[in-house]
Amino acid sequence: NGSRGYLGEALRIYPDLLAVLLEVEEAVLRKRLLARAREDLDEIEARLARSAELTGSAFMQSDRCMRLDNSGSLDETVGRLLQLIDSY
């Protein structure tokens, strides 16, 4: 588990690293963040904007970054992660 902002440094340290980017539909993420009630609406909107910016980066679009949809249930996401690990 790590920050997308730290990924460049992690790749320098671990050049064979395969990153797995958990993606979630913006509306689903907003709903989850609101339900947690840890951040106010302005903080949530800033977080969503930051997430979109980092997710759109060149590295996140490369083949060294596997994308995994986390918009569904935890069981569904874990199942897809295990499939991804098995296929790599």
Image (spheres, helix red, strand yellow):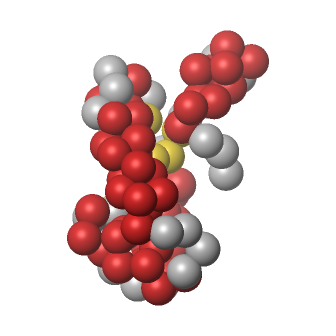
**Relative height, residue 8 to residue 4 (above, below):** above
Q: Residue at x 36, y 57 (%)?
A: 45
**Relative height, residue 54 to residue 36 (above, below):** above
Q: Residue at x 55, y 68 (%)?
A: 39
Say which quarter of the image contains residue 56.
Answer: top left
Viewer-closest of 87 and 14: 14
Q: Is residue 9 left or right of residue 47?
A: right
Say which quarter of the image contains residue 76.
Answer: bottom left
Image location of residue 84, percent across then percent down? 45, 56
Residue 86: tell me if it is visible: yes
Viewer-closest of 53 and 10: 53
Residue 80: tell me if it is visible: no
Image location of residue 10, percent across then percent down? 68, 25
**Relative height, residue 14 to residue 26 (above, below):** above
Q: Is residue 2 left or right of residue 78?
A: right
Viewer-closest of 23 and 77: 23
Q: Is residue 67 left or right of residue 26?
A: right
Say which quarter of the image contains residue 31.
Answer: bottom left
Q: Residue at x 34, y 26 (%)?
A: 57
Image location of residue 77, percent across then percent down? 44, 73
Q: Residue furthest top?
A: 12
